[in-house]
Image (cartoon, rainbow, N blue to C red):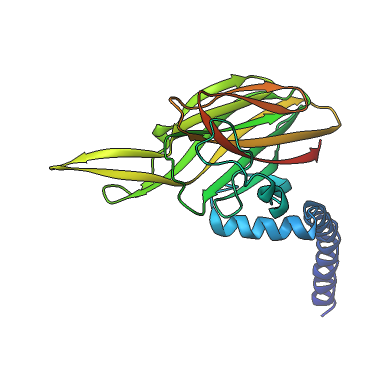
Amino acid sequence: MMKIVNSIYRVFLVGCILMLLVVPISAEKNTEASLSVSLTDNEISLLEELSMLDPTHNDIDGEIVSVSKLIVKQEYMESLSHYSTDDMIPLGPIGTNYMTMYVTVTRLIEAGYDKFQLYSYFRWDKTPFFQLTDGIALSWSDDFTLINSSMTLYYEGLAHTGYNNLKAYLSGVSPEKGVGYAFPKLYSIPGPGITYSTSLQFGAIRAQIRKLNSSGTANVIAKYVHSKLSLSGPSFSYGNGPSIGVSIIGAHDYREVCTHWSY
């Protein structure tokens, strides 16, 4: 009988020790989880909004640290109304009823580096009159080095509806400042006795950047350029700040959205 009691007592002690070992680990995980929820209520709302529009926006193993959406003030749009659509000048931001645009920053883990993915999503809410060659670019501060970049493009038409990322091509890259792509807003697919048009609906640009472990606050800006009566697509250049310059022949509109993050 005594042996049985001793056995039960030993099992109880082992169980208590295991509990003491497990509890701190669980507490550490809960702390990490609470630290990962560092976004504001507005950013969380925007992230939920973005998740519905593009479920693949954060298809990597990382922590989103910043989210932003551009809202163009109506009074500023009205100040541009005295221009006609035929003016061969950039008219400014694309109207709120034409395009939705977001930018996010995701922290990635790599030993010895501060590494992030920059992402910007755009969606045409209303089809513009001009459908030529458009472009989008990302630019960042703090001399982060570009590791890789990519584009996602979703088109819709009678002959094809779905992703066609091969339509994008690099159009201006600076390894420590920015990267940009150009792509057709509309392209044609020949069929038997007819040509089918396929129109861009939405897309996203991604860029992974890194620098040696440091600390500071960085900024990123995304700029979408819409060609109007232009003979070619946009070519991008980058300055400090960050900032994005555009080289294009003919009229164009644009839209910008920006955010910042700590590293």
Residue plotted at (61% across, 55% down): 50
Image quadrant assignment for residue 49: bottom right
Vertical order, 200 against 174 (above or below)? below
Find residue 250 and report its horizontal and vertical position in percent.
50, 27
Image quadrant assignment for residue 92: top right
Residue plotted at (30% across, 44% down): 197
Find residue 241 and report its horizontal and vertical position in percent.
78, 27
Whether residue 70 is visible, yes or no, is no
Find residue 169 and report its horizontal and vertical position in percent.
46, 27
Residue plotted at (70% across, 41% down): 105
The residue closer to the viewer here, 89 or 223, is: 89
So how many labels did they put on this image? 0
The residue closer to the viewer here, 140 or 136, is: 136
Quarter of the image with the C terminus is: top right
Find residue 254 and report its horizontal and vertical position in percent.
60, 37
Vertical order, 56 against 261 (above or below)? below
- Residue 128 is left or right of residue 222, and the answer is left
The residue closer to the viewer here, 12 or 173, is: 173
- Residue 155 is left or right of residue 68, and the answer is left
Quarter of the image with the N terminus is: bottom right
Whether residue 76 is visible, yes or no, is yes
Image quadrant assignment for residue 51: bottom right
